[in-house]
Image: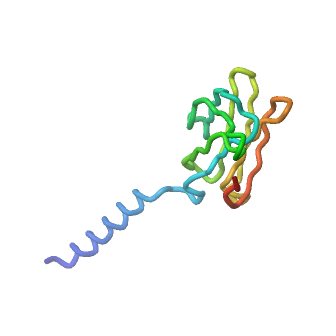
Amino acid sequence: MKKWVLPLVASLGFISGCASQPNRSGPDVWHVDFQYAFDHERVIVSSDGVQAFAGSVTTNDSTGLAKSIAIRNRGDFLHLRIEVPATGVTLEKTLDPQQGLFLAIKKQFDGELSLEQQAAHFSY
C-alpha cells in the first residue's frame, strides 16, 4: 500500500466526522411546560422562527400541568414565541441556556403569559 493512502483515509474520516457534528455549542433540547389556567386554548409555539407546536392546551387542576413539549435547539440561544390566537396574547423571549433548559409558561389572571426559566425539571 502506498504511504500516502493511510494519511488520506484518516483525513477523509476526520473531515466527514466534522461535517456530521452540529456546528453549535448550545443544548440539544429545551423542555417547555405549560402550567396553570389554560382551558382548551389553542397555543402556537415557534422556536427561532420555526413552528414547534400547535395544539390545544388544558391545565390538569390536580397537578397544575397542562402540556409538556420538547424543542430541539437550533443555536446557542433560543428565540421563543408563544401565541394564544383566540386572545391575541403573545410572549416572545430570547433565552440563554446558561440560565437553565427548563421553561414554565403560565397564564396569568389577566390573560397574559409569563415565563419562568430554571436549571432543573419543575415538580408536579
* 28 left or right, relative to 108: left
* Residue that appears at 77% across and 36% down: 107
* Residue that appears at 30% across and 72% down: 10
Q: Residue furthest left?
A: 1
Q: Nearer the viewer, residue 110 or 24?
A: 110
Position above or below: 80 against 55:
below
Total marks placed: 0
How far across and down, in percent of the image, does residue 35 sit? Answer: 72, 42
Q: Residue furthest top?
A: 86
How far across and down, in percent of the image, does residue 87 sit? Answer: 75, 22
* Residue that appears at 67% across and 27% down: 41
How far across and down, in percent of the image, does residue 95 sit? Answer: 71, 49
Q: Residue furthest front?
A: 62
Colour scheme of the rendered structure: rainbow
* 16 left or right, relative to 110: left
Q: Nearer the viewer, residue 2 or 101?
A: 101
Q: Residue furthest right?
A: 110
Rendering quarter of residue 100: bottom right
* Residue that appears at 74% across and 52% down: 117
How far across and down, in percent of the image, does residue 50 sit? Answer: 56, 35
Image quarter hosting the N terminus: bottom left
